[in-house]
Image (spheres, rainbow, N blue to C red):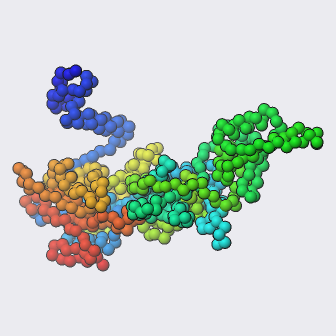
Amino acid sequence: MGYSKRFCNYDQCCEFEPRSWNQIYCMDCRCKRKVENERKRTDEVASFEKPREYTTLKIPKAPNGYKVLIVNDTQIPFQDVRTLEAVEKFWTDFQPDLELYNGDIMDFYCPVVGTKILTADLKWVRVENLKVGSKLMSFDEQGAANGGGRKIREGTVTRLTFVSAPVYRVELDDGTVLRCTGEHKWLQLYKGNVVWRRTVELYQQKEARSWQVPKLIRFLPVWEANDDNYLGGFFDGEGTVSSGPGLSVAAGQVPGNVIEGVKSRLVEQGFNFGVTTHDRSAENYQDMEHVTLQGGYADTLRFLGVTQPKRLIEKKAHFGQRLQQMDAVEIVSIELDGEHMIAQLSVDPPTYFAEGFGAHNSISTFDKNPSRRFRFQDEVDVTHKWLFGRCEANPKARRILIEGNHEDRIRRWLWKYGPDIAGLRALELENLLELEDLGIENIPYMSVVDLLGYRVEHGFKTSASKAYPINISRFMAIATGSSGLCGHTHHFSTYAWTDASGGHSYIENGCLCRFDLEYAPFPNWQQAFTYGVVRNNKVHLVPILIYPDGFRAEGEWYPRR
């Protein structure tokens, strides 16, 4: 059956033959996608009192000799100090009239928020609901010297802070998905041994594609406390718990509706148990039925956690038991998963159970690593100090900060975790960094500086392949239809083309951050920056690739000392 031609409902862009009676948008121009995108933007505007504004800051004229310098992706406090000092030396010599800070000048940085941690009272609690002093289920960091293995201990939370950081997504073959930083340690089964491994080391094992598939050890299942207090109340009043050998929970009651109700509920909730009858006729008492939980330490612990018999849990018989493995779960994939809010959790002793797996303090590694000792306020202070230094070194320059996706993390964090305070002006970037006092103009993420027709923006496109990245400068040139410059990718490239309107070029401006960040092992990044001079109201830009020993610019050599 055919349908008569009609015009597209989006913008009457063309006439098309619909495939069904209800097709109102043409397929060739992807008008349906355009409508959906516009609807999303409309929803965003309606949802927020102060919608995001994308602006284009135009600089239409500049005199001959007007000097420009563009930097991006310093990611303070993770800047490459030697590289930045060399660039700053050229910066001071060059004395630009316009300084463009093209995004990601600061970074804004261990289980991910939402990860469930097992407490000492056998409840799985989201990590953000813990506090310093909370008691957790912990275990020995290393096995006993006599080969006795690790034992369960009571741990105490000694530090808990929240930051934003890149995380890995670890998918296991049982469907479990874990998210954590590259420095987070897990207990791994490796060649028959139980060893601690950082996530980044597991990533490297997986990438090596060896015959030895990395496996994480699951020690406990994850459970939810049951709202039905029948079992908990019964075992709290009639039950006993003993700790040797193994963990044993039992309760007794005379035959009748009560004990039958207990057995029925145990079956319904999937608990294994045995029943024995104690003949007390010789003592002129009714017989007694004893119900004993079976299934080993993990199943008994699950019973206590689900039913929450307070008296039995307070006896702490579950501590001091030997740590027992449930199973070893193969890792299906490990990949970077963007930035998430994480909890830097420190426990004494330095272990805990995260989603049923054995986990280690990540904060201990961070304390040894200077790149991870910063908190949010520290990053703000250090970035402000650096910007102040640049203002003192070249006080007459005009300065423009184009926010990048890293600066935009503040907004995203507030929208997700602090909606009630998201409108506070004190939390806006220009107030945090005191940009007005520094004389720095600020435009929001995804905005553009139109410099004499040359488009400067932070950028948004990245390459799926880190080993063989695509030429982002070429992509952006085609996407924007303009000469321009972007950052964001940490890659350096250039692209030039000529059409009917003349010659054009696009620059992918590299980065000025370090290459030894634990979340990006062996990165295919390049350090670079761009400077230029205006002639005949056109800006002539020179991209500078920085080598391990330094770079040459304006006829001078600037070493990385």
Q: Is 528 left or right of 357, judged from the image as shown?
A: left
Residue placed furthest toward the front: 211
Q: Is residue 425 visible?
A: no
Q: Which residue is located at x 63 percent, y 58 percent?
A: 324
Question: Residue 155, percent across and down?
Answer: 63, 60
- In the figure, residue 498 lies in which quadrant? bottom left
In the image, residue 147 sits, relative to residue 506, either above or below, namely below
Q: Is residue 227 visible?
A: yes
Question: Residue 50, percent across and down?
Answer: 35, 42
Depth check, front residue: 459 or 29: 29
Quarter of the image where the N terminus is located: top left
Depth check, front residue: 193 or 124: 193
Question: Residue 39, percent across and down?
Answer: 31, 35
- In the figure, residue 472 lies in which quadrant? bottom left
In the image, residue 261 sits, relative to residue 60, either above or below, namely above
Count the marks: how many?
0
Q: Which residue is located at x 33 percent, y 53 percent?
A: 405
Q: Which residue is located at x 88 percent, y 38 percent?
A: 286
Q: Is 60 left or right of 515, judged from the image as shown?
A: left
Question: Residue 218, percent across and down?
Answer: 56, 55
Q: Is 246 left or right of 177, judged from the image as shown?
A: right
Quarter of the image where the C terminus is located: bottom left
In the image, residue 441 sits, relative to residue 8, either above or below, namely below
Q: Is 232 left or right of 62, judged from the image as shown?
A: right
Q: Which residue is located at x 58 percent, y 58 percent?
A: 352
